[in-house]
């Protein structure tokens, strides 16, 4: 549902394995790109350990600040999977085995297998809405504005795809990338001059080194097609006036009526 207003979000990555370096976080970029595509602005990402009070405090802090909070990790069957319990404590609600979750899990597990530690994955805080998981059929859940998902990337992705249509969204972002071969010191002034003219646009510079040359990708991002088009034209003109050869290398995001003229 797109109501045209700005919608904000944060991500909490939960897991000692991320902090130790044993596991590489693959979820942030996936979530961020999908939020951007539906006009939800990702404002903050935190990585925290499997410690109850840290999860409770972080969830309560961020859910009060942003429209949505997405968590990944800590909803499996082992002793250190404490996210569901911590979420229940954050909201001061009880948690127990949920028959709805059991019914989902029966699509994969035999009845005799739904016991012991495996039942930990069916424990859901009271009042939560379940999030479908078409891979392992062990659900995530959404409690008010907190969306709790698995840490395994493939499973997290199907959970996110399931829950996104239910969320309030804003105007989709459109992103344009301009490639230029020049050191950042040479393009800093044109970037600054263009950026200060547009409150509804962000303009970033991301340097690279290729074939013994310094270059940068200049990324323009906005929900306003007109601002992005105008900023693009101004920046390209300034760079060409400085004897550079800027090239548009990527345009992404937006809807049917957004960005159709940006790659002209």
Image (spheres, rainbow, N blue to C red):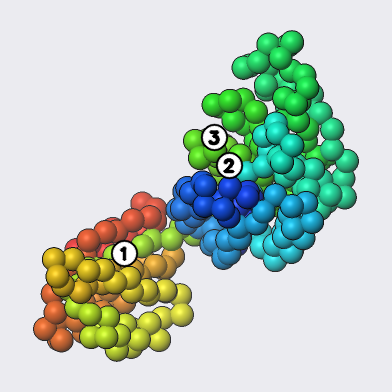
Find residue 231 and report its horizontal and vertical position in percent: 31, 77
Q: CA distance from mark 2 to mark 3?
A: 8 Å
- Residue occupied by mark 3: 155
> Comparing marks 3 and 1, which lies closer to the viewer?
3
> Comparing marks 2 and 3, which lies closer to the viewer?
2
- Asked whether disc 2 touches disc 3, contact meaning CB atoms under 8 Å apart, the reply is no
Q: Is residue 152 visible?
A: yes
> Comparing marks 1 and 2, which lies closer to the viewer?
2
Find residue 101 and report its horizontal and vertical position in percent: 73, 27
Image quarter (top left, top right, bottom left or bottom right) of the C terminus? bottom left
Q: Quadrant of residue 207?
A: bottom left
- Residue occupied by mark 2: 151
Q: CA distance from mark 3 to mark 1?
A: 30 Å
Find residue 177 and report its horizontal and vertical position in percent: 29, 65
Q: CA distance from mark 1 to mark 2?
A: 30 Å
Classed neighbour count for the residue bearing mark 1: other residues with Cα under 10 Å, few (<14), some (14–19), many (≥20): many
Position of 98 with respect to 94 (left or right) is left
Classed neighbour count for the residue bearing mark 3: other residues with Cα under 10 Å, few (<14), some (14–19), many (≥20): many
């Amino acid at each position: 549902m797109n109501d045209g207003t700005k919608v904000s979000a944060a991500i909490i990555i939960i897991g000692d394995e991320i902090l130790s370096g044993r596991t590489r976080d693959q979820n942030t970029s996936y979530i961020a790109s999908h939020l951007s595509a539906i006009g939800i602005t990702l404002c903050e990402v935190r990585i925290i350990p499997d410690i109850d009070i840290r999860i409770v405090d972080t969830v309560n802090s961020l859910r009060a600040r942003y429209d949505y909070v997405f968590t990944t990790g800590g909803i499996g069957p082992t002793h250190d999977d404490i996210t569901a319990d911590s979420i229940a404590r954050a909201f001061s609600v009880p948690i127990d085995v949920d028959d709805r979750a059991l019914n989902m899990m029966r699509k994969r597990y035999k009845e005799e297998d739904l016991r012991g530690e495996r039942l930990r994955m069916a424990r859901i805080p009271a009042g939560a809405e379940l999030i479908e998981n078409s891979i392992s059929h062990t659900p995530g859940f959404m409690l008010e504005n907190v969306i709790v998902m698995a840490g395994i990337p493939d499973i997290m992705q199907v959970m996110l795809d399931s829950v996104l249509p239910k969320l309030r969204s804003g105007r989709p972002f459109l992103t344009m990338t301009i490639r230029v071969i020049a050191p950042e010191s040479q393009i800093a002034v044109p970037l600054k001059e263009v950026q200060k003219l547009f409150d509804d646009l962000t303009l970033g510079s991301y340097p690279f080194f290729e074939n013994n040359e310094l270059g940068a990708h200049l990324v323009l991002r906005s929900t306003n097609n007109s601002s992005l088009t105008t900023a693009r034209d101004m920046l390209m003109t300034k760079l060409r006036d400085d004897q550079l050869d800027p090239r548009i290398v990527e345009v992404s995001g937006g809807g049917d009526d957004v960005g159709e003229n940006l790659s002209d």
